[in-house]
Amino acid sequence: MDVYAFEGTYVGNEGDISPWGTPTNASGTGAGISVASNAVLDAAMTLNANTTYAMAIVMDATGSHYYTNGDGSNEAYSNADVSMALGAATNAPFTPPPFSPRVFNGALHYAVGSSDIENFTFDCSNLGLNIVEAVSYTHLTLPTIYSV
């Protein structure tokens, strides 16, 4: 799994690889169809406070990809540390047209300015390319990402 991020919004960049830069790779072993599988980032991603980031998660092409349609009530998540505006997915990485609204399916584990890991989970299944827009309210490090 590759995780892309850049400062800004995914809107208008779903079909353009150029702003996304080099991804951070995540490694893990699939636990089976529709079973949560842990994917650990090879290197931590640091997101600065009060900054909007576009994020894209690209799964291995050999995996089965599922998605959840956005319905207006499931397209945003926030807590004291981070907010996520969930938005679009494509069948092939950075290839238009995007399907929108789509919702990130998985769990995110992160540390706020330290090594303490916080967790929140989304009710979802495997995806192809999924684009997540996150706003970090504090200095945020993403050491682990789960995909299901």
Image (cartoon, rainbow, N blue to C red):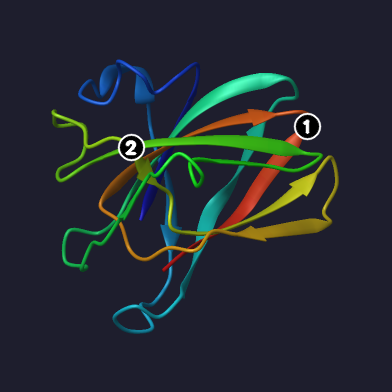
What is the three-letter code of the residue carrying label 1? His
* Front-lying residue, 34 or 24: 34
Above or below: residue 31 compared with residue 44: below
Q: Are marks 1 and 2 in contact (CB under 8 Å)?
A: no
Q: Nearer the viewer, residue 9 or 3?
A: 9
| Residue at 33 percent of width and 37 percent of height | 101
- Residue 83 in picture, x, y percent from top left: 65, 35
Where disc 2 sits, the SS reads loop
Q: Tell me residue 45's x, y (percent).
A: 60, 40
Residue 101, labelled with which disc? 2
Q: Residue at x 77, y 58 (%)?
A: 117
Q: Name the mark nearer the viewer: 1 or 2.
A: 2
Q: Earlier in the sequence, mark 1 or mark 2?
A: 2
Q: Mark 1: few, some, or many residues within 10 Å (few <14, many ≥20)? A: some
Quarter of image, res 48: top right
Neighbor class of circle 2 (other Cα within 10 Å; few <14, some 14-19, many 20+) is some
**Quarter of the image with the C terminus in it:** bottom left
**Kind of residue at disc 2:** Pro
Q: Mark 1 sits on what residue?
A: 139
In the rendered image, residue 89, in percent from the top left (x then y), is placed at: 27, 41
Q: Is residue 123 left or right of residue 14?
A: right
Secondary structure of residue under mark 1: loop
Q: 80 or 71, which is in the foreground?
A: 71
User: Outermost residue, bottom direction?
Assistant: 32
Q: Residue at x 27, y 26 (%)?
A: 14
Looking at the image, residue 10 sits to the left or right of residue 135; the answer is left
Q: Is residue 135 above or below residue 13?
A: below
Q: Residue furthest front?
A: 72
Relative to 9, residue 74 above or below:
below
Distance CA(mark 1)–CA(mark 2): 28 Å
Residue 77 occupies quadrant? top right
Q: Position of residue 51 (x, y in %)?
A: 66, 19
